[in-house]
Amino acid sequence: MNTNTSDRIKPDNKAISTYLDELLAQKFQIPTFQRKLVWKRENIKKLWDSIFKFYPLGSILIWKTDAKLQGHRKIGGHVISNEEHYGNEYQYILDGQQRTTSLLTSLYGSKTTDAENPDPTIYIDLTVENENEVDDESYKKRFLYSDEIFDEGGKFKRNKINKEKYDEGLIVKLLDVKGAFNALEGRLADSEAYKDYNNPVRTQLREAKNIFDNYRLSFIELTGIKVSEVCQIFERINQAGKPLDIFDIIVAKTYRPDSEPDRGFYLRDYIDEFRNSNGSAFLKISDLDYLQIIAILIRESEEDSDIKNITPIHLNKIQAKQIEDIWEDAKKAILNTFDFFSNTLEIKDRRLIPYRYLYMTIACYFYKNDKPDYDFLKKYFWFYSLHNDDLLENTTHLIVHIDFLKEQKKGEVVEFPHFIIDKETLRKSSYSSKGRLSRAILSLFASKQPKDFEFTDRKVLVDDIFFSTDKPNLHHIFPTNYIENNPGKNSLNEDSLINIAYLRNKTNLEISDKNPLLYIKDFADKGSNFEDVLKSHLIPPQLLEWSNLGCMPDNALDQFIEQRIDLIIKEIRNLLPDIEFEVRDPQEKSS
């Protein structure tokens, strides 16, 4: 579709009557990624009040494209799209679904009404006039629903007056104002009470008709725009700020109805069913994560798939049959990936995985791999998670990683590059729920299966105490008040990773802000093998020695930091045998 730049995003407008007629003529579609929203009845009244006062409503966003998406065929039971669509262009309502639904059902009612979804048809009371220029209350009486009018033979006495007005022709359907104005006008003109042309009731009727004749709805039409850019435009224009997810678009594009000879396909059902296959927390990864894993596996299984990356432009090329072809093997690969995190690495919480791209690289390694090398895979995970540099932060890195893993998967001898870790980086590292190094160090602590200080025979359930916030429920070995009074040369901040340990909430609360000299001795006196407990946290045994002595040196905090960093580096060395290992320390150079 060749479109000049000036025509790609074009404002337009049309009368309400025209838009409603075009909807009923099945000229628009609402894609399934537009989730069903339900406005309160009061909001729909306010919508019509804004129209009655000729206030602007905001633009309706229309995407004109040759891409066929799964769409909602009906609004309130009214068919608005034709499955046997002819032509090369589709018109999708990207933003304005609820306004469109409200306008359509306000006039034409709903064919799906029940106790929970009462009749949405709107009536207008022609006797209600604006109280003043800034009147914001009269709409409640001007626009009415049927259950505010009809009394069911006197059953609802509150509706008696409105029912009399309806019988007299003073309360009428908005639809009749649009399509039967002359009949309404004639009835009032024949009445002795309203025969005067300038009677306020007849004036109100003409003002209502004026809505359908002259009120213009604003549209923004997107033409010749690719799916990735449409996502960005939607997010910026949408008043609620809700992103238009590429996953939702692919769900709509790959949808296939269940009909002979083809069976149906609905990606959302595939993913939802898989998510519920067991209780693993990793199954709750995002829709986008799943979609990108699928894209990578299609890329690896089909040489001519044309899916070369995981960016929106490539994701947009995914076809239902491609997903079907890989799905059974993909599920096994993904489950093996999650099992590797949980039971090989002992990382139980998906929020601790340093790079989300690891879902894709490791799933790709497990895909149709009968003989995975877990020792190699552990090296791979820890090498790239803990390396001083970010080596898996973009899609270029991702493809390089997949090729690296593919070589080993084929049985070829592969070598890891030079591993670098910087002590100063560790000294300054702070907790962040989104930081790669933060999650990597927390994963390292979790993989040691740390034991509780108080109940030394119990492992701390890391997945129960880690929260994806900036204030996690993690224990600070040296409390804030101690750091403030004894900062040391390292100026350790309160969220330093070197000062963090996993503990049960009950134990953490019991410790509160006590000096480590005191609480370590209390716990050590209660149980045996407390030194092993400290080892499970990579906490230097020097802390226990100080507690036994009953005092700490003035530079205790500095000593603790350096000793714990050494323990962390020693643990990383053990995880990366036979790999060239370099420890950098700017402080040593400066001294």
Image (cartoon, rainbow, N blue to C red):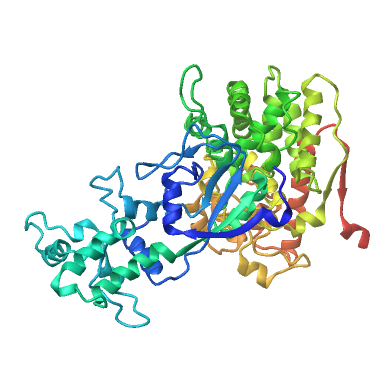
**Quadrant (top left, top right, bottom left, bottom right) of the C terminus:** bottom right
Q: Position of residue 309 (x, y in %)?
A: 73, 37
Q: Is residue 375 left or right of residue 330?
A: right
Q: Is residue 189 left or right of residue 48?
A: left
**Quadrant (top left, top right, bottom left, bottom right) of the N terminus:** top right
Residue toward you, 334 or 34: 34
Residue 230 seen in the figure: yes
Please report the residue visible at 78 percent of the width from the left and 29 percent of the height from the top: 405
- Quarter occupied by residue 477: bottom right
- Quarter occupied by residue 75: top left
Q: Position of residue 510 (x, y in %)?
A: 49, 58
Q: Position of residue 508 (x, y in %)?
A: 52, 55
Q: Is residue 188 left or right of residue 12?
A: left
Residue toward you, 149 or 410: 149
Please report the residue visible at 79 percent of the width from the left and 40 percent of the height from the top: 397
Q: In the image as oriented, which residue stretches furthest toward the bottom?
A: 132
Where 82 sits versus 237, above or below?
above
Where 574 sits versus 169, above or below?
above
Q: Position of residue 127 (x, y in %)?
A: 22, 72
Residue toward you, 322 or 550: 322
Where 253 sits versus 545, above or below?
above
Where 14 sits versus 451, above or below?
below
